[in-house]
Amino acid sequence: MNRFRALCVLPTVAALIAAVGNAGAAKLEALQAGALARAGADSAARLIALVVTHIRFALEHPQYFSAMSPGVSDRFADAVRDARSAAGHDDLDPAAMATLMAAVPHGLATLYLSGSI
């Protein structure tokens, strides 16, 4: 099926945006997997690799980034938990910390792409 025909079967603009967002999420997932493989076993290096990959992805693929639904992946939540635990910081809710730590790079990329910073 050619691309134009594939677009014609999407029922709404919302469905098209969701399809682009899903494609972007898959691309980001693959990039993050590669970044983690290169980061090795150090938990802080793994967390940094995910953050850097997220920001680079947003700047290099703004169309995908803007169509994606924001959220905290299990991969990111695990990296935050592991890095905090390795540093002796396991006193706070891991889900809340992962959300906070995911919001920073996502927010910075969003502000940059909008021209606010």
Image (cartoon, rainbow, N blue to C red):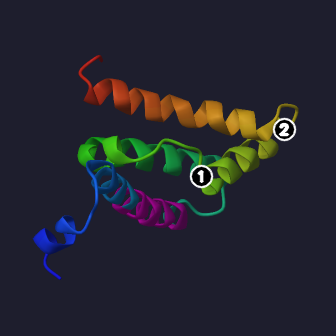
Q: Residue at x 34, y 24 (%)?
A: 111
From the image, which quarter does the N terminus lie in? Answer: bottom left
Q: Residue at x 28, y 53 (%)?
A: 12
Considering depth in this image, is 29 or 2 the residue closer to the camera? 2
In the image, residue 23 sits, relative to residue 79, either above or below, namely below
Q: Is residue 117 left or right of residue 88?
A: left
In the image, residue 91 sits, relative to residue 9, either above or below, namely above
Q: Position of residue 26 (x, y in %)?
A: 42, 64
In the image, residue 75 sits, relative to residue 3, either above or below, namely above
Amino acid type shown at disc 1: Ser
Badge 1 element = loop
Magenta residues span 23-37
Pointers 2 and 1 in contact (C-beta within 8 Å): no
Badge 2 element = loop
**Marker disc for residue 88:** 2
Q: Is residue 24 magenta?
A: yes
Q: Position of residue 8 (x, y in %)?
A: 17, 66
**Marker disc for residue 73:** 1
**Marker disc for residue 41:** none
Amino acid type shown at disc 2: Gly
Q: Is residue 54 magenta?
A: no
Q: Residue at x 54, y 61 (%)?
A: 36
